[in-house]
Amino acid sequence: MPNTDTNPELNPEHRLAPFETSPLPLGPWLVFAPHADDETYGMGGSLLKARDEGVDTHIVVLTDGALGGESEDLVDVRRKEIQQAAAMLGTRSLQLWEEPDRGLSLHRELVSRITKTIEDIAPASVFLPGPLELHPDHRMAAQLVWSALQSVEQAICPATYSYEIGVQNPINLLIDISKQQQNKKALMAIYGSQNSENNYEDLVVSLDKGRTFTLGPEVSHAEGFYHFSNQQLQRSLKDVTHEIVDLYF
């Protein structure tokens, strides 16, 4: 027999996704990308908007991307692609750490390096991949940055946001990128080594279009983010993610 003692009322839609867009998070920004291209596919429109609004941005690419294509000189190709993309974005700094592709793990040395980078750059906002991404490097990058943020002194800890790369993740913030969409397409086109592997450009445009479901018709495309609270950051990313998913029930 089903349990009829529980409250049958479910959370309304606005508890699960925003019904309006938000201004850009405070800068400077520090974006951690698992691979060269994730920063663009995931939040390229917002990065372009940040450039246009004078927000300083910094990008750290964690892996060498050696397994993401067929070219014999793939690492060098992807390095040149991200450098070109960063120049188009007006990025203040770009770091390429070249950890092994599909080899990210939660080890102390890498967490410490991320922590030191956050402390050295002193961003107002840090961005990490959403916890429900499919690629293991994406999910591990989220855990690495989360762990590093927990080591940063609370008084100087930046605001923390997750961003979507390939699939929808929990969100509580939407950025209108309607005016940036064409330039985001040009930015994505830089990544020829990846776009030849799949129709990533079309898939990303579809994701950005799908994120307007709760918005008015004046917004043609949007990028979704989750802004974590300081209280959430004191707990494990796994527990926080489960808590967010529980809102659907």
Image (spheres, grey):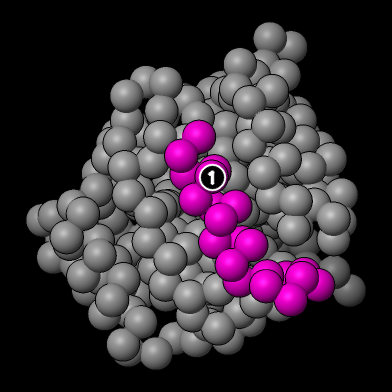
In this figure, which residue is indicated by the disc labeled 1? 84
Q: Is residue 134 left or right of residue 85?
A: right
Please, what secondary structure does the residue beneath circle 1 have?
Answer: helix
Start-end of magenta stretch: 68-88
Residue beneath the point at 30% across and 59% down? 231
Residue 60 spot, x, y in % from top left: 41, 60
Quadrant position of residue 69: bottom right
Give the main secondary structure of the magenta stretch.
helix
Answer above or below: position of 72 versus 51: below
Residue 93 spot, x, y in % from top left: 32, 49
* Residue 55 or residue 92, whichever sits in front: 92
Residue 134 spot, x, y in % from top left: 72, 68
Residue beneath the point at 78% across and 42% down? 201
Answer above or below: position of 69 versus 88: below
State the quadrant of the N terminus: bottom right
Disc 1 packing (10 Å; few <14; some 14–19; many ≥20)? some
* Residue 235 or residue 191, whichever sits in front: 191
Residue 12 spot, x, y in % from top left: 66, 36
* Residue 9 or residue 230, whichever sits in front: 230
Quadrant position of residue 215: top right
State the quadrant of the C terminus: bottom right
Confirm whether the magenta stretch covers residue 119.
Answer: no
Disc 1 marks a residue whose amino acid type is Gln
* Most distant residue in the top direction: 218
